[in-house]
């Protein structure tokens, strides 16, 4: 009887203790659902592969970089996983790493993780730094779809696009690393703050059964950890309560793919979602007519553009491409489709570039008469030019394309829309390519993060054999290797002339903007970027 009593007493003590502990530690944080047009283009989360607008939205929920951008301030660089840094010379940056940081798998963050990330196995494959201006011998092919243990074979061109001259990263001590470039580079700190330079656990990557397994559940240091991902359907992240920046304010975040904007909005109003992304300006009024909801957002560091395949027979003459640029009334597009909520930029650049910004540059003006004259001089006879298009991957993408086609038609250019489902199909070389939709973001505060990374020798356009210009490519090398700021600025100014007027590579349409609808009771602020911030201090109910 005594044994039973003792056992009962023990069970009673445990029973009374457990509820008290549970109550004291109850997690009352909310879980939220976000409706998005698309979660990931590649259905992976390795940011060298998912280097996209939709990938940017979630990237910083689970990943972090050594240096971050102060999105709430003046877009200056600020400490991230590195607390400080300095330059021993124009090829080297030494960084002190933040101590006490823990990965989602419980491993401590150390210099070994940084070195592993920026190694041949972690990023560059068998590529070497570009020191003489020569392009890499790799064509951009993207993810093959095959699960591969060998990460470098999947994506080295994307890495060298971001880090063309990086030679190596050395460990100074457990919390100090040194980045060493093969050439001078004034943008090294900016590259560390750019998408693609996130740090993940090298042990988790090494132990993954395949590249695909790792890429769909990377182990980072961010405020949220990936729990579950079902491609083309949903993504669930849980709070990382060992986050060095404080306890995350949301228990779990669920993103669901809802391709139709009307369905995203209806789900928000019905209470199915707490946030609805990718809202068009003409939908804002209807949402805010309900006093329980509001829409946040505005212009971001991204430009919408159309890109040429200059090797298409009808586009080989640069006068045809320039004529197409002069045929576009950009302000009419901004006013009609964006309700004046964005603007026409001064070419492929942002004031964010600081002293590299060419303030007196202008995109080709709207001049239909000049378009017709250029087409006449080029001998264009009205042959069709294909225009490859995704179905509203970008907000207002289809309506914009329809306006463009009509504007080109008014000057005599015969453009035919061809719908595609993926970016791979958009760049497919098996059929004639002409014009395609694109956007270009300021991945760092310098032209190397936009015009060079997209249209330079290592850029997506040249690697896809859509563009080439010898002088333009030489000037890209100046931007990437010179420490002379005056020389670099002169080179960039000349590149704008080449790429936008003399031998057009693209047509700037307008600055991109993004709008997010949410319940007004949720205290949350949108950033001037595609990414969504749910870190401590930016969410409360």
Image (cartoon, rainbow, N blue to C red):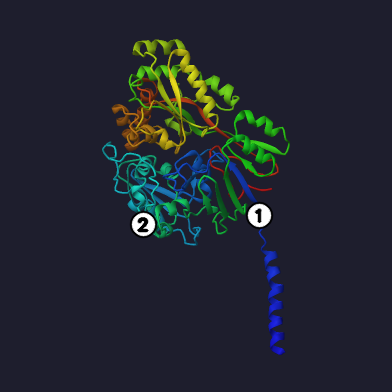
Question: In which quarter of the view is residue 213 placed?
Answer: bottom left
Q: Rate crowding at label 1 as few (under 14), some (14 to 19) or many (20 or more) other CA atoms within 10 Å.
A: some
Q: Can residue 533 be spotted in the picture?
A: no
Which one is nearer the viewer's eye here, 301 or 155?
A: 155
Helix, strand, or loop for circle 2? strand
> Which quadrant is the N terminus positioned in?
bottom right
Residue 343 % position (x, y): 54, 25
Callouts 1 and 2 close, C-beta under 8 Å: no
Is residue 41 shown above or below 434? below
Residue 252 % position (x, y): 60, 53
Question: In which quarter of the view is residue 113 placed?
Answer: bottom left
Residue at image location 36% in from the left, 57% down from the top:
172
Q: In screen coordinates, is 23 left or right of 246?
A: right
Residue topped by disc 1: 29
Residue 412 % position (x, y): 43, 13
Residue at image location 29% in from the left, 40% down from the top:
136
Which one is nearer the viewer's eye here, 172 or 235?
A: 235
Q: In screen coordinates, is 399 left or right of 153?
A: right
Residue 192 % position (x, y): 42, 45
Q: How many marks?
A: 2
CA distance separating discs 1 and 2? 39 Å
Q: Which mark is residue 171?
A: 2
Which one is nearer the viewer's eye here, 98 or 459?
A: 459
Is residue 38 shown above or below 4? above
Which one is nearer the viewer's eye here, 200 or 488?
A: 200
Question: In which quarter of the view is residue 143 placed?
Answer: top left
- Counting residues from the N terminus, which is met first, the one under dot 1 or under dot 2? 1
């Amino acid at each position: 009887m005594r044994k039973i009593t003792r056992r009962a007493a023990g069970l009673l003590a445990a029973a009374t203790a457990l509820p008290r502990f549970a109550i004291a530690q109850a997690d009352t944080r909310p879980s939220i659902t976000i409706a998005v047009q698309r979660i990931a283009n590649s259905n992976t989360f390795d940011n060298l592969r998912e280097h996209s607008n939709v990938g940017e939205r979630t990237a910083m929920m689970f990943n972090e970089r050594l240096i971050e951008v102060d999105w709430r301030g003046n877009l200056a660089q600020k400490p991230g996983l590195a607390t400080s840094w300095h330059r021993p010379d124009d090829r080297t940056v030494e960084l002190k790493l933040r101590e006490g940081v823990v990965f989602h798998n419980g491993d401590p963050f150390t210099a070994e993780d940084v070195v592993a990330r920026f190694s041949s196995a972690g990023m560059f494959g068998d590529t070497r730094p570009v020191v003489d201006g020569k392009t890499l011998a790799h064509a951009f092919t993207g993810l093959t779809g095959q699960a591969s243990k060998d990460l470098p074979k999947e994506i080295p061109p994307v890495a060298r696009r971001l880090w063309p001259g990086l030679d190596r990263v050395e460990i100074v001590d457990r919390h100090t690393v040194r980045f060493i470039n093969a050439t001078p580079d004034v943008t090294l700190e900016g590259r560390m703050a750019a998408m693609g330079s996130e740090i993940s656990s090298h042990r988790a990557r090494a132990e993954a059964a395949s590249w695909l397994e790792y890429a769909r559940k990377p182990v980072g240091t961010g405020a949220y950890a990936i729990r579950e991902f079902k491609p083309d359907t949903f993504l669930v992240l849980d709070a990382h309560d060992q986050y060095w920046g404080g306890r995350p304010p949301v228990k779990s975040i669920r993103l669901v793919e809802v391709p139709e904007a009307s369905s995203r909005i209806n789900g928000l109003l019905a209470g199915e979602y707490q946030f609805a992304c990718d809202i068009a300006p003409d939908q804002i009024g209807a949402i805010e007519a309900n006093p329980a909801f509001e829409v946040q957002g505005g212009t971001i560091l991204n430009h919408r553009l159309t890109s040429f395949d200059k090797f298409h027979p009808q586009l080989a003459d640069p006068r045809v491409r320039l004529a197409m640029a002069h045929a576009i009334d950009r302000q009419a597009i901004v006013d009609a489709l964006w309700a004046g909520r964005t603007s026409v930029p001064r070419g492929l650049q942002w004031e964010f570039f600081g002293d590299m910004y060419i303030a007196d540059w202008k995109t080709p003006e709207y001049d239909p008469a000049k378009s017709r004259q250029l087409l006449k001089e080029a001998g264009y006879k009205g042959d069709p030019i294909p225009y490859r298009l995704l179905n509203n991957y970008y907000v207002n993408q289809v309506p914009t394309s329809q306006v463009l086609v009509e504007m080109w038609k008014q000057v005599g250019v015969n453009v035919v829309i061809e719908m595609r489902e993926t970016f791979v199909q958009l760049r497919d070389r098996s059929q004639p390519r002409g014009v395609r939709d694109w956007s270009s973001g300021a991945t760092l505060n310098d032209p190397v993060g936009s015009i060079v990374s997209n249209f330079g020798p290592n850029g997506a356009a040249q690697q896809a054999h859509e563009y080439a210009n010898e002088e333009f490519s030489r000037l890209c090398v100046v931007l990437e290797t010179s420490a002379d700021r005056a020389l670099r600025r002169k080179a960039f100014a000349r590149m704008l002339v080449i790429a936008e007027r003399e031998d057009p590579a693209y047509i700037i349409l307008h600055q991109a903007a993004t709008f997010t609808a949410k319940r007004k009771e949720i205290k949350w602020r949108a950033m001037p970027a595609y990414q969504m911030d749910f870190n401590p201090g930016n969410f409360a109910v």
